[in-house]
């Protein structure tokens, strides 16, 4: 039973006046104008596009709030099992366009804005991206929120409210320069909840005591307190009234702005320093996309966020007055990578120290509550925290981690008495100097399910990093949920014309809710009218990217060229270096051709985009090389339109919405076994582009779905990688492919400017073992690019391939993933199956 704050007799007045949603264009316009005039204090004489954006966003926000409140009320009354997605990153991008679409107001808003004197695209582009993430992992979390709401799951996201998101990238003299991303100037989508706060403790010590019943308990005390303040953002589902909540925590000093005792005694600086130290916790997103740097502030962020979120979740559970044994029936917590793993010892601490449960009961509740998603098998990305650091910052948690380890190792010893060396391999504590806590092991041990994000990756998870754990727990604990993307943003929003074309053939936009319906598109693969429009759409999207390229990079590209795109974080394992070496090879080939031969060449534009982690020298040199090559090639009169090289600076979600629909070919060319899944590969194919890729991550399942003829695979397989690496180190003669040798010679000769900065790139391949096997795959890469050139010349066949591929992409909807998570991991069924079908209302 939930207490209402307004007595029965007064509720009529509330109902009469409670906010109403707008439905018509007139009501929409009225709300926009009212906000511009009263909330922003502007008028029609000084309303620029930024103000129009603000007014529109506020009008839409009013509308979202109604549904949001309603959803939350319904959930409070029904008190179903809820799923909590703990992710340190949510790469949301822009919210307005998505909100307009999801509440079904696209036409009304477009016409309304036109009547008020604005173009919808201009208004939408005023919004800054919410860039609270690095790359795929953060964007996946954002797609999942969209799907959870669309499928009516009662779900909350929890993260940090970073004051600075991922840095903005500028290019100066061909080098990446990082600029802070202060995105909170005007953010209409968040609601500060100053009444929802949690005090989070750090440092201090642990005291043992005996309570009245004679029971031994521990208490963590005398630490430093930082307050977490909740900021909520509504997450509307598509075609449903369900509007879920994303809760972001902001840190502030527990005593408010100043410590008044210090302030009053004249210690102004100390008083302000405390405040700044507290606020630093949620100040900035760490811009590393794969390396674990083990920084204290990062650990503080992780604990701060876990502690605040768990307090909130437990507080909500306790309102229901249910017994603790019901906890895991009411609460499913999904850990997005190991970053939230401290939630495991934190829940144990709450259950043991605050609620007085016995170890065994607390542990079975904890294990039943958590599920863990792994996103990488690369050793340098697996988090390990130094024991002395955890001891200092979280002394009680370290005890609990040791206790968990003790129980676990006892279990292993009992069950595998002959395998003593296994104990040190699986121990949560690594016996290094200093000792370190292996967070991935803690996550596995504390969860009831562990999943990878594509089939190959889940196999590698089972056979490499968690091999021993499969033996210990049995294979059922380890599963796969292949990633997906939301078709609302990545088809309908990014490519409205293609979405409209598909809708015209399928009798409406239902495919946006059930992407498997796309298979019906295949029936139109020979339909001339359909083909014509499909081709025109691709061309228009390429023209849009060409215009954008001209506007921001000053480079003219011909939209009739083959557009080859590689946009993602810059990393050696993703092998942008392979791509740019291939481009240089192409350039050298062109230079040595006769005019007759050149006339037969397929013109191509190579687009690159992506950020390098600020401390990642090699990745930064890759960016520099791309820019330097572009400078030379684009200015070469011999080459003209035959080859252009473009680095699109500051790649982010909103730019991806322009770039993705414009590809003919996109590159997903990671060293086999390194890219867990990839998700942009799915986006490109869904938008009518083909892929050149290695047998890695989700490329393999994309091949299974679209058919081998509709994808260009090349390169060595994951199972060969170990031997190839070994051969680089121990093989007697290392023979570089002559074409690659020529590429290196050209770089070293200074053709692309000072060769000094590029020596590391070349040396890593020639002298340092070529860890990412660029030289092993170079030949087949270049050959496959040749096949692509040939294939592209037959435009009709190419079109058939792209249409076929689009129609077979239904599997890659994030809606499918979310249902799989719900069924297999969170065990949200059966009650949710009903709501899922029928919606909440
Ligand atoms: C990515 N991981 C995988 N990590 O690389 C990609 O293959 C996969 O498709 C995607 O997750 C979604 O499953 C990724 O983006 C990060 O950015 C982390 C940020 C924090 C530090 C460690 C890496």
Image (cartoon, helix red, strand yellow):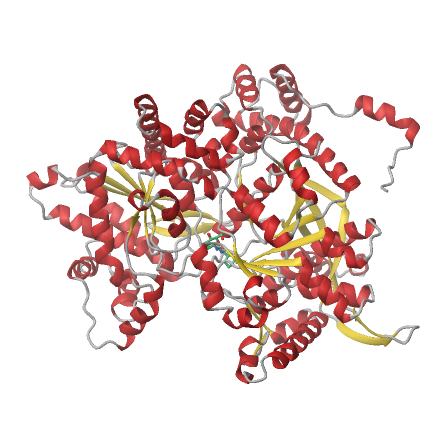
Residue 288 placement, left or right of 645:
right
In this view of the protein, can residue 758 be seen by the observer?
Answer: yes
The residue located at (88%, 33%) in the rendering is 6
Does residue 474 sit above or below 641 in this rendering?
below
Mark yes or no: residue 494 visible. Answer: no
Tell how many labels: 0
Q: Quadrant of the C terminus?
A: top right
Nearer the observer, 697 or 263: 697
Vertical arrangement, residue 336 with respect to residue 644, above or below: below
Query: In terms of depth relative to the viewer, which is nearer, 26 or 792?
Result: 792
**Residue at 51%, 68% in the rendered image:** 466
Residue 619, image quadrant? bottom left
- Horizontally, residue 643 falls left or right of residue 490, namely left
Q: Quadrant of residue 60?
A: top right
Quadrant housing the N terminus: top right
Residue drawn 63% across the image and 16% down it: 24
**Residue 148 location, x and y as percent?**
61, 42
Say if 522 sits above or below 666 in the image. Answer: above
Against 30, residue 325 (above or below) is: below
Q: Position of residue 741 (x, y in %)?
A: 18, 62
Where residue 696 sits, quadrant-wise, is bottom left
Residue 298's spot in the image, x, y percent?
59, 62
């Amino acid at each position: 039973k939930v207490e209402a704050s307004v007595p029965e007799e007064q509720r009529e007045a509330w109902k009469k006046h409670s906010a109403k949603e707008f439905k018509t264009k007139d009501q929409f316009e009225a709300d926009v104008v009212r906000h511009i005039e009263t909330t922003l204090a502007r008028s029609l004489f000084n309303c620029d596009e930024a103000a129009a954006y603000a007014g529109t966003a506020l009008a839409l926000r009013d509308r979202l709030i109604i549904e949001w409140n309603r959803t939350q009320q319904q959930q409070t009354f029904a008190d179903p099992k809820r799923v909590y997605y703990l992710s340190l990153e949510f790469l949301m991008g822009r919210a307005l366009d998505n909100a307009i679409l999801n509440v079904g107001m696209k036409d009304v808003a477009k016409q309304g804005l036109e009547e008020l004197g604005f173009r919808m695209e201009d208004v939408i582009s005023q919004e800054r991206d919410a860039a609270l993430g690095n790359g795929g992992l953060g964007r996946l979390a954002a797609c999942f929120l969209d799907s959870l709401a669309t499928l009516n799951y009662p779900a909350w996201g929890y993260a940090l409210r970073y004051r600075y998101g991922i840095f903005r990238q500028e290019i100066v003299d061909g080098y990446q320069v990082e600029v802070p991303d202060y995105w909170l100037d005007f953010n209409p989508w968040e609601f500060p909840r100053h009444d929802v706060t949690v005090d989070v403790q750090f440092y201090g010590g642990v005291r043992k005591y005996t309570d009245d019943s004679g029971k031994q308990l521990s208490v963590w005390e005398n630490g430093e307190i930082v307050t977490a303040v909740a900021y909520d953002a509504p997450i509307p589902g598509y075609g449903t009234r369900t509007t879920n909540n994303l809760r972001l925590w902001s840190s502030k000093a527990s005593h408010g702005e100043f410590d008044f005792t210090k302030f009053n005694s004249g210690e102004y600086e100390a008083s302000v320093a405390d405040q700044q130290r507290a606020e630093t916790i949620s100040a900035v997103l760490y811009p590393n996309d794969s390396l674990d740097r083990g920084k204290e502030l990062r650990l503080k962020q992780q604990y701060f966020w876990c502690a605040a979120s768990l307090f909130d979740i437990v507080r909500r559970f306790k309102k229901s007055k249910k017994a603790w044994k019901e906890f895991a029936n009411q609460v499913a917590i999904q850990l997005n990578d190991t970053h939230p793993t401290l939630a495991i010892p934190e829940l144990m601490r709450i259950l043991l120290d605050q609620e007085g449960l016995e170890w065994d009961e607390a542990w079975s509740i904890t294990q039943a509550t958590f599920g863990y998603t792994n996103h990488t098998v690369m050793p340098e990305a697996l988090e390990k925290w130094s024991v002395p650091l955890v001891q200092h910052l979280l002394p009680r948690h370290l005890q609990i981690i040791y206790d968990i380890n003790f129980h676990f190792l006892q279990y292993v010893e009992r069950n595998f008495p002959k395998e003593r060396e296994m104990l040190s391999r699986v121990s949560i504590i690594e016996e290094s100097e200093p000792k370190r806590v292996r967070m991935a092991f803690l996550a596995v041990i504390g969860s009831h399910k562990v999943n990878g994000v594509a089939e190959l990756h889940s196999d590698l998870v089972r056979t490499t990093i968690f091999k021993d754990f499969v033996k210990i727990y049995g294979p059922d604990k380890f599963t796969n949920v292949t990633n997906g993307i939301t078709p609302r943003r990545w088809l309908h929003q990014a490519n409205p014309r293609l979405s409209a074309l598909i809708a015209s053939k399928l009798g409406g936009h239902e495919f946006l809710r059930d992407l498997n319906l796309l298979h019906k598109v295949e029936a139109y693969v020979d339909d001339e009218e359909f083909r014509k429009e499909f081709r025109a759409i691709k061309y228009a999207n390429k023209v849009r990217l060409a215009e954008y390229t001209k506007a921001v990079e000053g480079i003219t590209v011909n939209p009739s060229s083959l557009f080859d795109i590689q946009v993602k974080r810059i990393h050696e394992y993703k092998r942008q270096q392979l791509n740019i070496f291939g481009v240089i090879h192409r350039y050298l080939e062109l230079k040595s051709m006769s005019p007759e031969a050149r006339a037969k060449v397929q013109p191509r534009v190579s687009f690159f985009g992506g950020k390098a982690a600020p401390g990642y020298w090699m990745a930064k040199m890759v960016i520099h090389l791309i820019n330097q090559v572009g400078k030379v090639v684009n200015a070469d009169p011999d080459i003209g339109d035959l080859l252009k090289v473009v680095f699109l600076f500051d790649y982010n979600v909103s730019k991806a919405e322009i770039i993705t629909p414009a590809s003919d070919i996109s590159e997903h060319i990671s060293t086999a076994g390194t890219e867990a899944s990839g998700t942009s590969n799915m986006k490109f194919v869904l938008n009518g582009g083909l892929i050149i890729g290695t047998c890695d991550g989700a490329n393999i399942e994309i091949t299974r779905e679209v058919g081998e003829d509709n994808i260009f695979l090349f390169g060595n397989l994951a199972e060969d990688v170990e031997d190839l690496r070994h051969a680089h180190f121990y093989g007697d003669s290392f023979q570089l492919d002559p074409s690659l040798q020529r590429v290196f010679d050209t770089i070293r000769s200074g053709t692309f400017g000072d060769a000094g900065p590029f020596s590391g790139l070349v040396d890593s391949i020639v002298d340092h073992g070529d860890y990412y096997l660029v030289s092993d795959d170079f030949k087949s890469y270049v050959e496959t690019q040749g096949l692509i050139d040939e294939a592209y010349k037959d435009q009709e066949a190419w079109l058939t391939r792209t249409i076929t591929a689009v129609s077979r992409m239904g599997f890659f909807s994030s809606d499918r993933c979310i249902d799989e998570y719900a069924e297999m991991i969170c065990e949200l069924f059966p009650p949710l199956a009903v709501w899922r079908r029928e919606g909440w209302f």
